[in-house]
Image: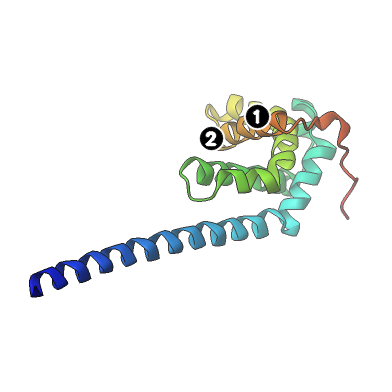
């Protein structure tokens, strides 16, 4: 009888531990998503995306960027690259990411293609390996929701 009670208590403790682990994991994913959202909405990253949309159209436009502009644009791209790695590794919920960021991810990806090609040609590799798979999944997400980006305009310059 004592052995049966001991086994039942052990099983209950194990079930409770698994439950606590699962709850904490879900909270950690939410917390990380909030931190990524704060990063991607920071002035620096928004300014980088704005510069990307305004100034990058081809290789010659990239060569005309100031050092600060280039760094801000690269930072904005890096944020999405990191988000892509987080999605790939399951650190954040993929659907939540796309609910919040799919349009911005795809728009930034399309605008960044000349810069990414330039960097890959110049440096011999693509430092933003997480961005392309994220953008492709975001495109699929938007297509499944029948969202056509050609009808969504960006509001304009940031000061």
Identified at 49% across, 40% down, the residue is: 88
121 with respect to 10 (left or right): right
Q: Give left or right: position of 22 versus 80.
A: left
Q: Secondary structure at mark 2?
A: loop
In the rendered image, which quarter contains the N terminus? bottom left
Residue at image location 44% in from the left, 64% down from the top: 24
Above-or-below relation of 69 to 4: above
Please provide percent x and percent y for residue 18.
34, 61
Residue 140, by quadrant, is top right
Q: Residue at x 74, y 42 (%)?
A: 104
Q: Which residue is mark 1?
A: 140
Instruction: Give the residue at x 79% y 34%.
Output: 56
Asked if the residue at tag 1 contacts the one at tag 2, i.e. Cβ–Cβ closer than 8 Å, the answer is no
Q: Which residue is mark 2?
A: 129
Check the image and report above or below for 21 versus 135. below
* Secondary structure at numbered mark 1: helix
Quarter of the image with the C terminus is bottom right
Which x, y percent locates residue 143? 71, 28
Q: Is residue 49 above or below residue 126?
A: below
């Amino acid at each position: 009888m004592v052995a049966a009670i001991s086994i039942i208590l052990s099983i209950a403790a194990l079930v409770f531990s698994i439950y606590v682990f699962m709850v904490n994991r879900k909270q950690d994913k939410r917390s990380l998503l909030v931190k990524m959202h704060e990063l991607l909405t920071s002035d620096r990253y928004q300014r980088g995306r704005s510069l990307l949309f305004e100034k990058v159209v081809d290789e010659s436009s990239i060569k005309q960027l100031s050092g600060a502009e280039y760094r801000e644009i690269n930072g904005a791209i890096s944020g999405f690259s990191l988000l892509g790695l987080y999605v790939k590794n399951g650190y954040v919920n993929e659907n939540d990411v796309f609910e919040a960021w799919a349009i911005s991810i795809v728009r930034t990806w399309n605008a960044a293609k000349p810069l990414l090609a330039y960097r890959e040609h110049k440096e011999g590799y693509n430092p933003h390996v997480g961005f392309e798979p994220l953008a492709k999944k975001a495109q699929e997400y938007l297509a499944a929701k029948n969202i056509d980006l050609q009808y969504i305009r960006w509001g304009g310059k940031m000061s």
